[in-house]
Image (cartoon, rainbow, N blue to C red):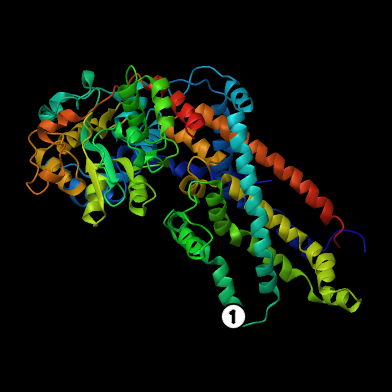
Amino acid sequence: MTGAPSPAIASRGGAQRPVWWLILPALVLLVCFLVLPYVSIVVMSFREASTRAVYGDGFTLEHYTTVIADPFIWGIVWRTLRTGLIVTVVTLLLGYPVAYHLARTRSRWASVLYIFVISPLLVGLVVRTFAWLIILSNGGVANNALKWAGLIDRPIQLLNTPLGVTIGLIHVFLPFVILPLLGNLQAINPEVAMAGRSLGASRLQTFLRVTLPLSMPGIQAGSILVFVLSISAYVTPAMLGGSQGRTMAVLVVQYLVDSFRWPAGAALAIFMAAITLSVIAVYLRLTARAMRRLP
Amino acid sequence: MPSRRQFLAAMAAASATLPFAGRLRAQTPFVIPTYGGTWAKFWEETLVPGFTAATGTAAQIDVGLGKDFVSKIRAGGDASPYSVFMGNENIAATLRAEGFFEPLDMSKIPNAAGLYDGLLNANNSGLRAIVSPIGLAYRTDMVQTPPKAWTDLWDNPEFAGRIGLYQIGNTGAQLFLRMTGKLFGSGDTDMDTAFAKVKELLPFTQASWSGEVAASLMRGDVAIAPVDWTEILMLQDKGAPVEIVVPTEGVLSYEQSFNIVATGDRKDEAHAYINYLLDPQVQSNMADVFYTSPANREAVVSDALKPRLPIQGDAMSKIVRFEWDSYVDIAAEVADRWNREIG
């Protein structure tokens, strides 16, 4: 049928036109509370340092050149990335079976398990981390249990180490990998796996060649979320890490809040954000290649 | 495309909020910055009501750390959210160097006449109204030979590996570092000697604040640490096996510096507040609640507290103080060096 649209169609088309002002509040919020502060931080990072004013009069690249040429900073960057990587891998390994079970189970206890999964999020982060502080201390539950089991004679240092930070972060971020995975696994039709079994594949083969590849979007989303949250976490490394477990977020806060070095701290923050973005870009490229083969 | 009417409506809605902004500015409350926990409780329940009753000025508190107040004053530019600043003297020195403070008008703070020596800065550029001396605290059940001097930290082998100190972001670390330079080097700014000697104490636990080092003592993670009387007497009240001594070389001290913020708009009230803080009765009350040493000579320490609070009255002269205004120039360098050399 050709010719002018009927009045009904024209009216419907009019109703579907984007209503620009509906996005205005979100746009204002984004510009005011994300873009403008970011611009402000970028500008601050090029300011000259001063001990007689918040920052000097001129602009400089010095903060960036200092950071880039400093092996001490690179050491903390590496520790931060390594911690983020370990936390991401361990939460994936721990979270996948839980998400898989939750997605497939028909048990009436499923909702209880679901509550268990999200329970860490129901308690404040400082409170949870404080609990770990008590558990990981020299006279804490962890050391006492190891002593009781005869594995150690004297307390081992768990607090104020990268290991302590890693343990704390795994606990904090486990739900963040389970929840995206759960949504993804629930969306996979179980009959696809059953088809694999009916064609002679073992359980393991079916999982490795059917379910796991199909759950890649969930793995990607969960792992990026946990990785980004881990490397930018402040409270847990600050409380459990001490100087040995210090991460970039802690160092940035130290520059900004403890030493009042706003320009240098801003440069450090931008530097870390650039590294994080680079790592995620590489990861996205690698995982996108794996997902391209998905139906 | 938006219609002209929609655009005008949006602009009108936005501009309608502008008069409120002006009105809010005109009604700026007198904001008192203070710390959290028991501090905030005392301020809310006792100090602010008392201040309002004494001066007729309504006030509200803002809870945070001295460093947070610095950030807010800096970010406020020429319109600080506070007219009065409270924070450790070394932190206050940063804002002072940046020109955010103005000298106190001493005619508006008559109670300052009772201040102990050393608590009023030169040129009236701030005063310290809350004093929490720092001594050597130790676990009585973990230490056989109680410490007598700061140098015992180096000389007594039973303390090795069981010492608690502070991260450099805490005033306690800076005080300890300068004291180390004074004890072993050419003076409190002899950082080379100070760092060399502090390195001799490694490994030691580093805490972010005095409450954390007190908790480490409680858990038995450390056996000895420089801690303020406030924390230790509170632990003793809970039955913890801890004791604190006055080292022979003198004590260090967390001293809350009070300053008038040049970019604040309630300076008269700020002066009145500082004057109220220095009131002998208020100082006595704070000694009872926080175990702080009264800054005012006129304040009376109760007989029950006297034996537990050795740094008061004439003994206030045992506080070892350092000059912070020039330290500002090396503070960032010292913090950076600590991170690299101490960890």
A272 vs B107, left or right, is right
B32 vs B296, left or right, is right
The amino acid type found where label 1 is placed reads Trp
Q: Is residue B128 above or below residue A206?
A: above
Q: Give the image quarter of residue B208.
A: top left
- Comparing A153 with B116, the one in front is A153
The image shows residue B209 at horizontal and vertical percentages of: 36, 42
- Comparing B67 with B174, the one in front is B174
The image shows residue B161 at horizontal and vertical percentages of: 41, 41
Q: Is residue A52 among the parts visible in the rendering?
A: no
- Comparing A18 with A53, the one in front is A53
Instruction: Report the residue at 70% width, 53% height from top.
Output: A18
Instruction: Report the residue at 69% width, 46% height from top.
Output: B1
Q: Is residue B108 among the parts visible in the rendering?
A: yes
Q: Is residue B260 above or below residue A289?
A: above
* Mark 1 lies on residue: A109
B104 vs A195, left or right, is left
Q: Quadrant of the C terminus of chain A?
A: bottom right
Classify mark 1: helix, strand or loop.
loop
Q: Is residue B229 above or below residue A268?
A: below
Please state the chain letter of the residue tagged with numbered disc 1 in the rendered image: A
Q: Is residue A136 above or below residue B334?
A: below
